[in-house]
Amino acid sequence: MAGRGLEAFASLARVIPEVEKPTRKVQFKEKIFWTASAVIIYLIMAEIPLYGIAGLEGDPFAMMRVIFASERGTLMELGIGPIVTAGLILQLLAGSKIIQIDRSKARDRAVFAAANKVLAIIMFGFQAAVFILGGMYGPLSTSIALLVFFQLLVAGIILILLDELVQKGWGLGSGISLFIVAGVTKSIYWSSFAPIGPAGDGYLVGAILAFFQSIMANNVQATLIRPMGLPDMVGFISMLVIFVILIYAEGIRVDVPISHARFRGFRGSYPIKFFYVSVIPVILASALFANVYFISSILSSRFPNSFLAEILGRVDAVTGQPTGGIVYFLTPPGNLQAVMLDPLRALVYTVLFAGICVVFAKLWVELTGMTSRDVAKQLIGSGVQIPGFRRSEQPIREVLDRYIPVMTVLSGLSVGLIAAVANFFNPFGTGIGILLTTSIIWQYYQLLAKERIEEMYPGLSRLLGRG
């Protein structure tokens, strides 16, 4: 049974707007419609400026925007950050056994989901208040401050409901994943084709447009590496290389042979992917690092001489760059030149980020029923066994123990290293953003294929575990 604290959250959730699960089978085209609608609403909110705010200068959280699908000065100022943070807090509490959750029980899963929703709304309110009181929008009158707070809180609730709409069966996949992909895709498109210019060096902002402009001007070298943080061809090429590496890695897996006890002659395999825990560790690690950065930025602006600000380090209000302390080593160098100037920072950031990803990978596997023990139970429950072994949990678990623990560590380590090192090359959409987008698109490709097969052959739904 879930802990009393979560039960209290579940009680609060009853007074919060909720998207009901569909009581009928939602057709594939209808799911596409609602999925697209959720993305369009998100993109519209990401373009609507906050009423009462004008003349914003600088962006201390520019490096975190792509990861959390947020836009400076708009209704999507906070993005999905509070939702991810709420999930991170609850996962840590569950992993440390402070709260007791049995995911095999439907009620515990429902209570946990309700607690996640309520805590996400609380986090939206908390971060909105901190942004306002921390001076992110400059000095505001009490009425304007309350208005901005209300806008951010309502926008956050809408975002939660959009995610709920997609996840509860009206759409496909996860709303959070969709918003990440939409944000990263928008960033990549803008970095490649932004038509605004000239921008300081006489070239257009978008790297692709600037590249063709440089060909006509017979000065291609000028767009390979550009000053002033403008997108360049090195970033574009880095993005393509990272995409290729990730797509190749997504196909790496170990196939454990299986057979079915009731269907003689049936032979198949249970795939254990190299990216066994997908990109979840990167999202959680990014949320952890971003919250440290967030706290440090607020302390820098409001309490610059405090002891905690000295320890965490200060963040420049205009450039958003940390100038020292712990947060300095928790943010990646912006490009290869910065890596060369301070290789220690690059090394410490990479080691810390990859290490945290491994920790979260192991924690996530335990919490979500992906351990060898859990998978063995699922296989036995489905009437599946491994050829040459008796049909019981113990021998199947022993076989899976050869692969799953290793894949868990390798998965967390590899996605952490790829995300961390990729950032050094300043690719479009950031290294972490590309990693998340590639994995999410791959999952959606498989999900769409599965949905189409089920619609064409309804009798396969039970075999695919959807009946």
Image (spheres, rainbow, N blue to C red):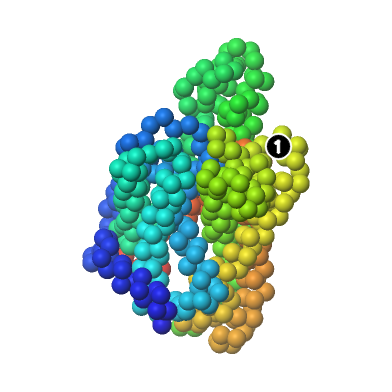
User: How far across and down, in percent of the image, does residue 15 sit?
Assistant: 25, 65
The quarter of the rendered structure image containing the C terminus is bottom left
Q: Is residue 290 visible?
A: no
Q: Quadrant of residue 273?
A: bottom right
**Nearer to the camera, 301 or 328:** 301
Q: Which residue is mark 1?
A: 338
User: How far across and down, in percent of the image, does residue 372 sit?
Assistant: 59, 76
Q: Is residue 142 visible?
A: yes
Which residue is farthest top?
Answer: 217
The quarter of the rendered structure image containing the N terminus is bottom left
- Residue type, mark 1 in image: Ala
Q: Is residue 412 left or right of residue 18?
A: right
**Nearer to the camera, 246 or 339:** 339
Count neighbours of disc 1 (C-alpha within 10 A) and say few if under 14, some if 14 to 19, many if 20 or more: some
The residue positioned 76% from the left and 46% from the top of the image is 344
The residue positioned 60% from the left and 68% from the top of the image is 362
Q: Is residue 291 above or below residue 340?
A: below
Secondary element at image label 1? helix
User: How far across and down, in percent of the image, does residue 126 sit?
Assistant: 42, 55
Q: Is residue 222 above or below residue 174?
A: above
The residue positioned 56% from the left and 26% from the top of the image is 207
User: How far across and down, in percent of the image, does residue 11 sit?
Assistant: 30, 72
Q: Is residue 267 above or below residue 381?
A: above
Which residue is farthest front?
Answer: 305
Q: Quadrant of residue 385?
A: bottom right
Which residue is farthest left?
Answer: 23
**Nearer to the camera, 191 or 304:** 304
The residue positioned 32% from the left and 46% from the top of the image is 146
Q: How many marks?
A: 1
